[in-house]
Image (cartoon, rainbow, N blue to C red):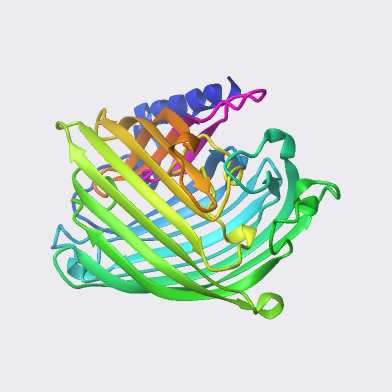
Amino acid sequence: MKKALLLFIVLLSFNQLYAQKNILPRFVRRMFFEKDSSRRSSFIVLPALTSAPETGLEFGGSFLYSFYTDTANKRTNVSSIFGYATATTKGQNRMSIGSSYWTPSNNFHYSANVSYINFPSDFYGIGNNTLLAYKDHVDEKRFKLAFDGERKLGQYVYLGFVAGELNYRYGDKEANGIFTTDPYIEEKFGGNEVYAGPSFLFDSRDRNTYSTRGVIVTSYLNIMHGLFTNNNYKGAFFNLEYSQFFPLSKRFVLGLDVQTQNLLGGSSPFYLMPTLGNDEIMRGYYNGRYRDRNLLVGQTELRYRISDRFGAAVFTGTGEVFHDSFSFNQLKPNYGGGLRYFFDVEKGLAVRMDYGFGQKVPGEPRQSGLYLSLGQSF
């Protein structure tokens, strides 16, 4: 009830602010409320307010600089630089800055990101059927440096590469918890890895922010090697995601999204395993409650554009994590809905608020969560 009330208060505040926009300073009106068809660059400073089951409320500051490298060609995707620094009600904090750069006519695409996260959180063990009773509070610190680039080879096809470095550090706050006692958890203290590999992109969407038609397929293979204390580790991580959008009418769009992630190699560092649940897919699940070597998830989302500024969506999906073999009997449900506020109508940039529901495990409350995020779920 408190989360539903918070969602109502946030939406009511947006509505009241929009109704009284003329009393705001000119630069604020330009950032959040005025339409601009000139395709000029924009700089927006936002008080960061997000939410997820694993963070509670997350607050801080963020900025978004968006621009076009070619204002004459309307098919050139919008580029952006985004950064934030936040803290959460569960004692976590993180900082990140990233960029997405599209050259004129989308001939090349480059993205880069550097982030640091101090993220104490709950660990439940490994597998698709962990229990709330297993919950063990664990300290986690993460540093990530990532870069990728793609070159356009056809009308919709891009080939490229990914590269980066990962650093994870862990400590168990409960000496007798599952994190300490489970012998099947590998690399409990974390480790360092560097990775590189090929990437593939097929993108026929009408736009890369609020898509109403087309297909996007993204895939990459991270070939990883350990450094320092875990320099014997060799493995790989494979990701494949397919999304398609169907315009049902002027205001309705149906989106379909399917994703698989796979940890390859003989070793299974727990922190490299795919996890179920985040603000983009399987909304409602605590991220990290379920983790294993393989993940397969799918969702569909019906989007309704109420007006230029406001939208709504309902979604449903299913998925699971598994060690070796996939089982239809182990699929978990997910469903929910939310609202969107488009603060930049021309570029299709929006703030998204969703509430997702998940599985009801016997003896536990139904898994659910509120999400306040920037951009569409997929």
The image shows residue 215 at horizontal and vertical percentages of 22, 51
Q: From this viewpoint, is residue 211 visible? A: no
Which residue does the image show at 51% across and 42% down from the upper left? Answer: 277
Where residue 149 sits, quadrant-wise, is bottom left
Task: From the viewer's side, name the closer residue of 207 and 290.
Answer: 290
In the visual, does 186 lie left or right of 39? right
**Residue farthest right in this picture:** 175
The image shows residue 67 at horizontal and vertical percentages of 30, 60
Which residue does the image show at 41% across and 74% down from the upper left? Answer: 197
Does the magenta-highlighted stretch encompass residue 340? no
Which residue does the image show at 68% across and 44% down from the upper left? Answer: 124
Vertical arrangement, residue 155 with respect to residue 1, above or below? below
The quadrant of the image that shows the N terminus is: top right
In the visual, does 334 lie left or right of 211? right
Vertical arrangement, residue 113 with respect to residue 204, above or below? below
The image shows residue 228 at horizontal and vertical percentages of 68, 80
What's drawn in magenta, residue-wise?
354-378
